[in-house]
Amino acid sequence: MKKYLFIVFFLSCVVYSAFAQYFKKDTASYSAKSLKLDEVNLVTGYYSQTGDHATTLGGVGDEKVQEISSAIDLKFVGYTNPNYVHSLTAGLGFAYHTAASAAWISKTGASRKEGTRVYPSLDWSVRNLSRKTEYSLGLQYSNEFNYQSLTLNTGYSKTNKNNGEFGFKLNGSFDRVKMIYAETMDKSASVLSGYQLVSASDATLSDSPLYKVTTAASGSSGSSGSQTSSSDDDEENYSSKPRTTLTAALSYNQIINQRMQVAFLADFTGQFGYLGLPFHRVFMADAETSKLETLPDNRLKLPLAVRLNYFMGDRVIFRTYYRYYTDSWGINAHTAYIETPIKISPFFSVSPFYRYYTQTGSKYFAPFGQHTTSEEFFTSNYSYSAFTAHFGGLGVRWLPKEDGFVKSVELRYGYYKQTTGLASNVVTLHLKF
Amino acid sequence: MKKFKKIMLFLLAALASSSCVAVKEYQKSRLNDSEMALTNRKVEKEELNFQVIKEGAAGANSGKSGGGCGCN
């Protein structure tokens, strides 16, 4: 962990030293035709999670996760003629995590708990100032031990005479899931012995856990073992399966008056291919040994959202958001969000925020030991269960002098709690140079 | 039918917003404040990432609506 903290710190120092002199010189206007570095963003985050519904153990067991991530992007801006503004953004992100549940891909708890993810990206857009249109193209890649994702997107937007902007975006993610299977585990396995079944009719997910931990087992032993259940650590031995996600996103932004603007958003998403994970176990009521999570090979999603921002007086902003969501797996969800940045001074603001989220459960979800072998599809992944979540926190934002090296500093902390018992803390720092 | 009604309400709200006050460029000082932006801010990136993984719903927030592992 210390090693990765050091890497994040080192990267931050490199960015600072690399661009310190550059920014001092870059005081010219954007009249230059060639691309020039316009801004650099560095986002560093820390995420910590606890819970006791690990999907690797069929919906029971330690869900502890810690992740540290850091991403940098460089935005270049230039003009090919006075009407065309080109933007090119190159990004690179890195994340390191430990997950207690990953240890139980093997039935002995000896699998590796750590993992890393690297995610470069490249985005280009051109804005026609006279026609008030914009075209964009983007390419993102993400790589971790068992998962690769390549995303392509293209977009178009046009601003009308009435201060409205219509946007259309197509997005395709072409992923590969490495088939690292969880070892078959018996219900009587020692790691599960601490969980005692409470009659499903006597308990609901929202007010009490179905399973009580009496002697929580730890998955920490043998952390130097391999990621997989196999003794052979050779990656080439694993096959992979595709997962494709296609999204058509529509948006319409409208200025209502000098203080208020609103956005309407709609995504039409289809997912196809292998949509489960091969190391997610499911324990059945009528079988002693675990099965692997089995889900349909397609999923259609329809989220509809509205965002409304209002500037009250000279110091207070209301940022609000509501989303309705439905999908073909039976999940219906509502999300409501409010954030109120308060400008203590023109250069410093504090932003308390609160987010409420609730969803119905998927028809394919059931807790530990409640599915039966006659079912075609089954999962004990609690992200598909019925629950409510609360997320609240505080952000602070500081704008140093305009001609300084750092353009803005934002720090944000949030605490998240689900009625499933999952809780997490997240801290994010955004530096803009 | 319920879903259809919700979609219709959404579209009606969108149409209703087209009757707005004309705002000139020089009157947009508040609207152009970075905290008034109608998108997620970069500082929200980390939390949006875990919400996509830990919740069943995703999308319509200028973020991911699928793709990625979320393995843990």
Image (spheres, grey):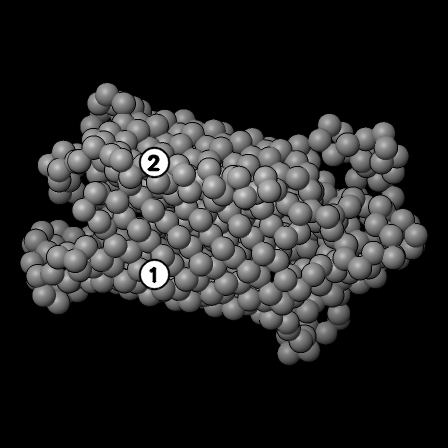
Distance in Å between CA atoms under marks 2 and 1: 25 Å
| Residue A218 marker | none
* Residue B65 appears left or right of A206: left
Residue A72 locus on image (x, y percent): 35, 55
Q: Quadrant of residue B35?
A: top left
Q: Residue at x 62, y 38 (%)?
A: A359
Residue B55 locus on image (x, y percent): 59, 44
Q: Amino acid at mark 1?
A: Gly
SS for tag 1? strand
Residue that protrudes farthest toward the bottom in the picture: A236
The chain identifier of the residue carrying mark 2 reads B
Compared to residue A311, the image places residue A107 above or below, namely below
Disc 1: which residue: A155
Decide if residue A180 is in sight here: yes
Residue A296 locus on image (x, y percent): 69, 61
Q: Residue at x 17, y 35 (%)?
A: B22
Q: Residues within 10 Å of mark 2 (few under 14, many from 20)?
A: few
Q: What number of labels is visible? A: 2
Q: Nearer the viewer, residue A239 or A336?
A: A336
Q: Amino acid at mark 2?
A: Ala
Compared to residue A44, the image places residue A390 above or below, namely above
* Residue A296 appears left or right of A163: right
Q: Nearer the viewer, residue A134 or A346?
A: A134
